[in-house]
Amino acid sequence: MKVKTLEALAKSGALRGRRVLIRSDLNAPHDAEGRITNEARLVASVPAIRMALDAGAAVMVTSHRGRPTEGQFTPEDSLAGIARRMGELLGCEMPLIADWVDGVKVEPGHVVMLENCRCNVGEKKCDEALSKKYAALCDVFVNDAFGTAHRAQASTVGVARYAEVACAGPLMAAEIDALTKAVEEAAHPLVAIVGGSKVSTKLTILSNLAEKVDQLIVGGGILNTFLLAAGKPVGKSLCEPDLIDECRRVLDILAKKGASLPMPVDVVVAKAFAEDAEHRVADVDDVREDEMILDVGPKTAAMLGDLLRNAGTIVWNGPVGVFEMAPYAEGTKALADAIAEATERGAFSIAGGGDTVAAVSKFGVADRVSYISTGGGAFLEFLEGKKLPAVAILEERA
């Protein structure tokens, strides 16, 4: 993907004295008292702002928070706490500006936070008039919010269409580069791991990746449905019998291109969905009617680990078991360790999705994975083969 970047503009001196509007993703979780409970998105957004400030720009930053009703601003929608914390992270004052659509005053070398953009009427529908007002605020628009790249809204797509210059911030550019390297320009063997509770939520991803990968590893309830499609007993496991034909269609796509979906030889089963439930390792053909599959077994984990260690590229979206519970975490841990080892040997690995990022953190491999996507829904839609509107407009403007 070819886009202009904030980094290139900063290095060229093109930002000095210019008005720069940065769309960040600062939608951080808060507790009941309004305290920020996870600063990952804030920390990830600092480099773009610092880059623009250091280049001598007058900087405006906006973001969404939550799901406000347009035109009906409430205190819960405010970015006040986020502006305060961002100022601390940047080491400078970051005033919060309300009612900013019709004009903002900010001097070069200074930064302001523009109140929650999703409160503006016309934001979600990418209203043309609103988009043009956003564009009039700046000389350079920077999209650094990859997590919203799948949404065609005024602050992600509309402003990029009408701004004098539209470019990608460092976080957005890194996501684009990593995803392109992982899927469109992958070194083979390309192995994808897709876990989750339901085939129905990942069907498009499975079908798209089946066209590209050499091996497709599935886990969780998705695996149970594939086992059912293969005629294996799954007891009372979570599965979707009505999607057996779709699973077989994915297997057909893989078979036609000489790729495979490795089936487990053993699984961890329990009689109840609980950490203290009676559980055992069972042969994949020996799952009883009163048992549910909650993880892959040790033999399967070893087999999948060997496969991953020999990969050239690994795309990881979803655990293979209920890793939050100790008895059913070993399969995901084994895969995490194998991915880390493959990466250290030179493979390119990318992990994305909430559960996946949580697993990466839990098993201590964050610094041994090539790239951890912050994208959420945008990451998933890229894996589905969809064109991300906010990326497409940056390519068009480039």
Image: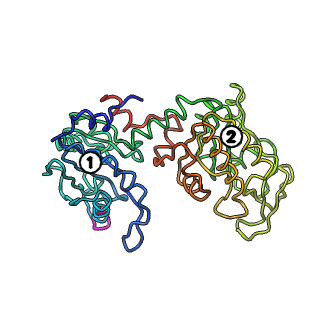
Q: Is residue 287 above or below residue 177?
A: below
Residue 318 position in % (x across, y down): 60, 49
Name the front one of labels 1 and 2: 2
Amino acid type assigned to the residue bearing label 1 in the image: Gly
Q: Is residue 214 above or below residue 45?
A: above
Callout 1 touching callout 2 (CB < 8 Å) = no
Amino acid type assigned to the residue bearing label 2 in the image: Leu
Name the residue: 54% across, 35% down.
Answer: 182
Name the residue: 68% across, 42% down.
Answer: 217
Magenta residue check for 232: no
Residue 213 position in % (x across, y down): 63, 32
- Nearest to the observer: residue 180 or residue 207: 180
Characterize the local packing of mark 2: few (<14), some (14-19) or many (20 or more) Cα atoms within 10 angstroms. Answer: many
Q: Is residue 93 left or right of residue 174?
A: left
Q: To which residue does mark 2 refer? A: 308
- Nearest to the observer: residue 324 or residue 76: 324
Tell me which segment is drawn in magenta: 74-78
